[in-house]
Amino acid sequence: MKSFHGRTAVITGAASGFGLETSRLAAQAGMNIVMADVQQDALDKAGAEIEALGAQVLRFRLDVAKAAEVEAMGAATLARFGVPHLVFNNAGVSSGGLIWEQSLKDWEWVVGVNLMGVAHGIRVFTPLMLEAAGKDPAYEGHVVNTASMAGVVNMPNQGVYNVTKQAVVSISETLFQDLSLVTDQIHCSVLCPFFVPTGIARSERNRPADMVEAHAPTKSQLIAKALGEKAVNSGKLTAAQVAQMVMDAVANERFYIFSHPNALGVVQTRMEDIMLGRNPSDPFKDRPQIGAQLREATRKA
């Protein structure tokens, strides 16, 4: 995308983390912004901040897992700003634990937000963007989907999260290929962050009441939560730096956005396992103390 000024961005998960930081950058670049989030109080606060930067803001409270709510956001966006130019399907949640201990509600919640939230964003906004491109040869559009390093390597005790993020990488690569069949005016990217301090480790705060289990978390789930919070909060890269990577990728039409490219060795090992027919390698071979800690804690569970 050659220019951001005067154009419109739709950002989900906009009240915190990558979504809020990208909203700040978009505002500074002169964009109109549709800020969407499930947490109303945080959205109101974030929206007021972005408006204070001089941006025109439409705040939209929604649960991205619900198709009708994403469709309503699409209609509200058209009514206020017209067809958007940047769609950042960023909202996401985290849930860990041994994969057979994930309940039906765990699966429905995480798949609903992480995967179907992206799918709804694509199916609602991409046709609008394609129609705009067909009418205006100067129109430029870009879709960014937030996956994770868990989208390209499968870590233990994170099964439901891994599944959804692998699917986001797949849907994004497919979107890239499908768009290339029909247009040169709309592009896409997939964001694969590693450990960055955001609110992802506290996802349960926004879990809908009808998705909350009556029983207590299992020990493996508690282990995953504790280790996840420690890992996320220990990250040295900031959400603001990742947001800048997102904006740079949009400007340069770059598909893969890795926050920690030095961590891609585990991805290479995974690909080699597949190509050579090997059993999956130990993902902690370069950090054996972490693997040993996880195994010891899980076997005591």
Image (spheres, rainbow, N blue to C red):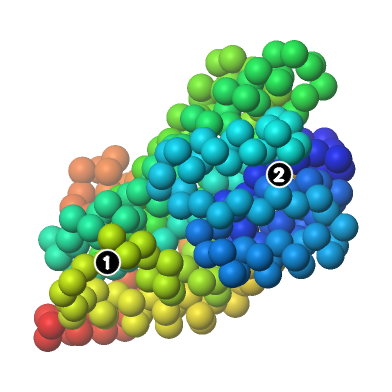
Q: Amino acid at mark 2?
A: Ala
Quarter of the N terminus within the rendering: top right
Horizontal side, residue 87 vs residue 146: left or right: right
Q: Are marks 1 and 2 in contact (CB under 8 Å)?
A: no
Q: Amino acid under label 1?
A: Val
Specify the label residue 212 is tagged with: 1
Q: Position of residue 20 (x, y in %)?
A: 66, 62
Q: Residues within 10 Å of mark 1 (few under 14, many from 20)?
A: few
Of helix, strand and loop, which one carries label 2?
strand
User: Residue at image x 79%, y 16%?
Assistant: 137
Which residue does the image show at 43% across and 39% down from the upper left? 67
Is 6 placed left or right of 199 in the picture? right
Where residue 244 appears, as percent x and y from the top left, is: 72, 58
Q: Residue 263, image x and y in percent?
A: 49, 63
Distance CA(mark 1)–CA(mark 2): 32 Å
Is residue 216 visible to the viewer in this orientation of the structure?
A: yes
Q: Which mark is residue 9?
A: 2
Q: Residue 35 at what x, y percent from top left? A: 65, 53
Between residues 76 and 86, which one lies in front from this camera angle? 76
Q: Residue at x 51, y 25 (%)?
A: 177
Front residue of 209 and 138: 209
